[in-house]
Structures are given as C-alpha cells and as structure tokens.
Amino acid sequence: MNIMKLITKITTLLLITLATIGCREINSLTDQNKKPIQGGAYEVLVVCNNAEWESSVGAKLRELLEQPVEMLNQNEPMFNVLRITANDFRHLLLQHRNILKVVISDKATQAQITAEYDVDAAPQIVLTFQAPTQQSALEYLNTNGDALLKVLEIAERNRTIAYAEKHNVKVLNDLLRSEFDIEVRIPKGYELRSQSQDFIWASYEFPTASQGFFCYSYPYRGKGSLTADYLVAMRNNFAKRIPGPSDGSYMITVEQIPDADGNYKPFTPLYRSVVVNGKEWIEMRGFWDVENDYMGGPFVSYTTINDATNEVFTIDCYVHSPKYGKRNFIRPLEHLVYLISFPKSVQQSK
C-alpha cells in the first residue's frame, strides 16, 4: 500500500499534528515515478466554484493565504493564489505543487480538511476542505486557518530539504563542520565568499538578486549572551566582515526606520524563541543596510548554544533583491536552519 496515497483526516485537534509530522513524508516516501510538480514556489491552486469563492468563505481564504509576509521591505503575500472552478481542474493543473479543493455540500458530516500527497505529481500536497455549510466552513477557518498555512509552508520547506539532501555543496558542508562542529547540508548554488576566525560567509548570486548567509560563533557567558541587544551587537560585529559595493562600506543592522510622515524612529528586530528539530533557537527578523553606501534588504537569523563547545552559534541569512520580490529568496534561507544538526556527542552531553 502506498502511504502517500492515504488520506490523512485533519480534525481540529489533528491539524497541528499534520503540520509538524505529515509533510515530513514527502522526503522519504515520494514516488520517484511521478511527474514533476508544476507551478511556482509559494503558489496555491484553489479549486473552488464561484458561489463559494464569492462568499465569506472565499474572502476568508484570500485573507489567510494572501496576508503579508512579516518583516519584508514591501508587502508580499504568503502565497500567490490561483483560483479555478472544479470543471477547469484538469490536464497540467492536476500536477500543481499545492492544491486546495473547497467543497461545500450537505453530504459532508462536518467541516474538515483531508490531505493527500503525490496524487498526480511529486512532491505534491493536495488538501480538500469540505463542510456541510458555508457557516461551518467559515468557523473552521477562523479556528484552524493558521495551522492550514503551516501545512502549506512545511510542504514548501520539505521540498527545500529534499533538494539539499540530494544536491549540496560538500566544500561548504566540510568547512562549516570544521569551523563550528555542526553537521549541515547547504543546497547547491551557494559559493564561499569569505572565511576568517569563527566566521564563514556564502551566497547564491542571481543576475538581479543575491541570497546569502554568514555563520559565526562566540563564547557563551550566560543569559546575557542571548539578549536582543547583545545579538544585534554581535551581528554588527561580524557583519562588518561583509563588504559593500564601495571602498570602506560594510553591512550593518537597521536600527531606525521612517514612519508614515518620513520621520525616523527607533527600530528593534523581531525577537522570539523557536524550536527546530527538537532544539531551541532564537529567531530574529529585521533589516540590514550598508554603511557608507546605498544597499539593503531583510534578514533572518537563528541563534542557539552549541553545548559541546559552550559557544553561541548563529546562522544569519539576508536577501538583496532591489527590483523584484524578496519572499521566494528569504523563504529558502529560513529553511537552512532545518538542515543543521549537532554531533551525537552534543546531544549526549545535555
């Protein structure tokens, strides 16, 4: 029996479970004989008839899927939504990477979402949202909307992870292992830009954009080493090693942003704790700039303690894309932290 064909029922209690576990199957159980997926990253094909799409249910789905990505320089939706009717759902559209079917019918006993993987392509996720009435559908989305987004995000993340498992840069993997005592798989396309003590910088260059990351470490001296102010100070300390386009220019962290009237006000990066693969990290999101030049963009960093070395370790990821959107560059960078693990000796020492 092909597990990827099994329909996983998502009730209110199980939706979060699917978000954290179900999509993991994409990595290990994808059918290699399936056709490749169609559509762009972070694109969702919604199969929904006109009545539902023009109702409060359709409005809620658009509100959820198209809400802005946090901490970007301009508004970009979490997902690009393509909507078609059930009659038009055929041919290449069956192979879309992310499909959400909406069915409002009195034949449904309750509002729920079911999920299938790799139905007509791989790695694909097909969600079916069914409810007996529009009201029950709306209530379900109000309660479980965030978890629905998480399921779709994890599907995209797992595609990044699956690609990195097969296509990675051994030279960078070895350098990061040697310098920071970590195991990592950096996806193909990244190249080493600079290396110095406790610091490695790599980037993936495009004709009109750049996505890069730099890793650094320093001694852990207690909780003060992990405060927001200290992390920003250490970020600036290491970011100076990333040169800007002109002599004497270098990367810095934005600490002031203009308000609606054009007046500058203090700005502090978003700071929160997240758990990745069972390990606690501090996530920071903000903006970077270049001292003595004009250049900038968003960044996201992840910081944790390497118990084996008693050092603070950070992977700091940035995007420069002045002409086009930044979402599809920052998202794969966010996934890099899921490709990092610590040696078994680290886990055993806890």
Image (spheres, helix red, strand yellow):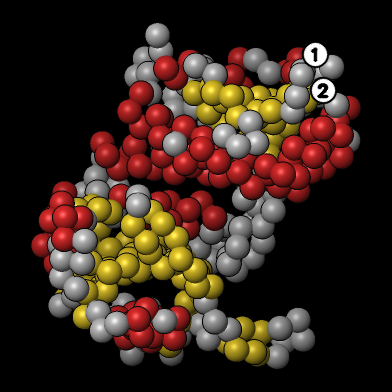
Circle 1 Cα neighbour tier, 10 Å, few/some/many (<14 / 14–19 / ≥20): few
Kind of residue at disc 2: Pro
Q: Is residue 127 visible?
A: no
Instruction: Label 1: state its secondary structure.
Output: loop
Q: Residue at x 65, y 15 (%)?
A: 90
Q: CA distance from mark 1 to mark 2?
A: 6 Å
Circle 2 Cα neighbour tier, 10 Å, few/some/many (<14 / 14–19 / ≥20): some
Q: Residue at x 81, y 38 (%)?
A: 138
Q: Residue at x 47, y 21 (%)?
A: 118
Name the image quarter holding residue 268: bottom right
Quarter of the image where the C terminus is located: bottom left
Which numbered disc covers residue 201?
A: none
Residue 307 percent location from the top left of the image: 20, 67
Q: Is residue 227 left or right of residue 83?
A: left
Which numbered disc covers residue 132?
A: 2
203, above or below 129, in the image: below
Task: Give the residue pinned by disc 1.
Answer: 107
Instruction: Label 2: state its secondary structure.
Output: loop
Of 185 and 293, the residue lying toward us? 185
Of 32 and 339, the residue lying toward us? 339
Q: Is residue 80 left or right of residue 238?
A: right
Of 301 and 207, the residue lying toward us? 301
Residue 313 percent location from the top left of the image: 27, 70
Mark earlier in primary sequence (1, 2)? 1
Label 2 near label 1: C-beta < 8 Å? yes
Q: Residue at x 49, y 27 (%)?
A: 124
Residue 289 percent location from the top left of the image: 47, 80
Residue 224 percent location from the top left of the image: 36, 85
Q: Is residue 178 visible?
A: yes
Q: Is residue 120 left or right of residue 132?
A: left
Kind of residue at disc 1: Lys
Quarter of the image where the N terminus is located: top left
